Amino acid sequence: MKYFEATLIARGKKEVHNFLAVDRKEAMSIAQSGGMVVQVKEVAMPIVARLQVLKDEIESKVFTGPVKAQDWIVAMRQMGVMLNAGISLSDALGEAASATQDKKAKRILFQALEDVEAGFSLSISLEKSRAQVGAITMALITLGEKTGTLAESMLKLADMAEEIRDNRAKVKKATTMPKITLLAMAAAFVILIMQVVPKFQSVFSKLGADLPAPTLALIAIEGFLTAYWYYLLIGIIAMVFAHNWAMRNRPKYELAFDQYILRVYLIGSMLSLGFYSRFMMIFGQLIRSGIPLTESMATSGGTIENSYVRLKLAEAGRGIGQGKQLSTALDETTLFEPMVLQMIRSGESSGELDTMLERIGEYYRMRFNHLIDNFAALLEPILMLFMGVLVLFLALGIMLPMWDISSAAMGKTK
């Protein structure tokens, strides 16, 4: 990061601001948000600024991760209500920062307050905390500043964040029982393998019976778990850490994984419907506010967490920039079903694209809620099949040799 000094004309007088930026282009962009730029130049960073940078770096490592959803929802709603009542942005930020209990949110809001009082826009102030506040926050606040409807955008942001929180709670509730079932089945399998199979193995070896393939497989699994269980545990932990690291640092791996997860039964549909609903709602809101189509596509597509969907939407945005219609560009992504594309074509021809996009968003939301409500019922056949295969495998492994031994014993008595 470099240190810049900007001379501005703001509120009818000359002002000088100092700030950090990656290069002069970014410095110009930041300076323009504060007023009419007279001059921007790189200067030596003073000791006080260096200490502040070091402090910010330490705090950024301590306060990593997203803010608490509930605290952020309350803060955004409070700010929206206060701005609607005519209270200044600085006062609204100060009140929200003082009221919130989340340390991350409090730090972000107080930092934004300092930047706003120094003449910067709220979106520029929050940009450095994008990872904590999320892309949706940045998109709607930027929209509010561009259209002069910051209060309405913050209230819309609070509603959208509340809906996302509720959806996550629904997903968590819907997947709780399948998780418990799978864990119980895994625990029962391991206990049977570790406790029951060794006892049967000693009986079979004494009788000298020829063991069938399922029993040999059970014995092999028991021997592996007994000898290498700690290696298995370490391997699982290492795989989880490696996956998380690759998702953060290897874009190709992230892209491949995000593309694969969308194909997983039920999970892929659940994620896709959530992404598309959010995208259509934000996209429609941006277009209704008069934001150009290409910019609206870039902003709304940037709110999607899945890198594969985000890449496809970015390709559609480039297609629109080259003169393609929205329906044609989205058709080439292969993300959306024919009915949705037909609705978009209808919106383009009638001049009510924003309304049609919001209807599509509602359609995806309805499908998402229906899927969540029926998630357990849809997953039940797979769990039953998995449980049946597991029980059959255990039964064959234990009962087949006992049957052979009893048959041999009956033959000898005859």
Image (cartoon, rainbow, N blue to C red):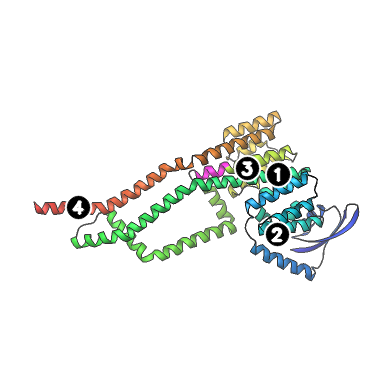
Residue of label 3: 278
Using the image, determine if residue 379 lies above or below residue 35: above
Residue that sits furthest to the bottom in the current view: 47
- First reached walking from the N terminus: tag 3 or tag 1: 1
C-alpha separation, residue under disc 3 versus residue under disc 4 = 61 Å
Residue that sits furthest to the left in the current view: 414
Residue drawn at 67 percent across, 66 percent down: 58
Residue drawn at 80 percent across, 69 percent down: 46
Label 4: element kind: helix
Using the image, determine if residue 376 lies above or below residue 188: above
Q: For marks 3 and 1, give the one nearer the viewer.
A: 1
- First reached walking from the N terminus: tag 3 or tag 4: 3
- First reached walking from the N terminus: tag 2 or tag 1: 2
Residue of label 4: 404
Callout 3–callout 2 Cβ contact below 8 Å: no
Callout 3–callout 4 Cβ contact below 8 Å: no
Residue of label 2: 107
Q: In the picture, which quadrant includes the N terminus?
A: bottom right
Region of the chain picked out in magenta, as a range: 262-273
C-alpha separation, residue under disc 3 versus residue under disc 1 = 16 Å
Neighbor class of circle 4 (other Cα within 10 Å; few <14, some 14-19, many 20+) is: some
Total marks shown come to 4
Residue of label 1: 155
Label 2: element kind: helix
Residue drawn at 70 percent across, 59 percent down: 107
Q: Nearer the viewer, residue 67 or 87?
A: 87
Q: Amino acid at mark 3?
A: Arg
Neighbor class of circle 1 (other Cα within 10 Å; few <14, some 14-19, many 20+) is: many
Residue drawn at 61 percent across, 44 percent down: 163
The spot of residue 241 in percent (x, y) is: 52, 61
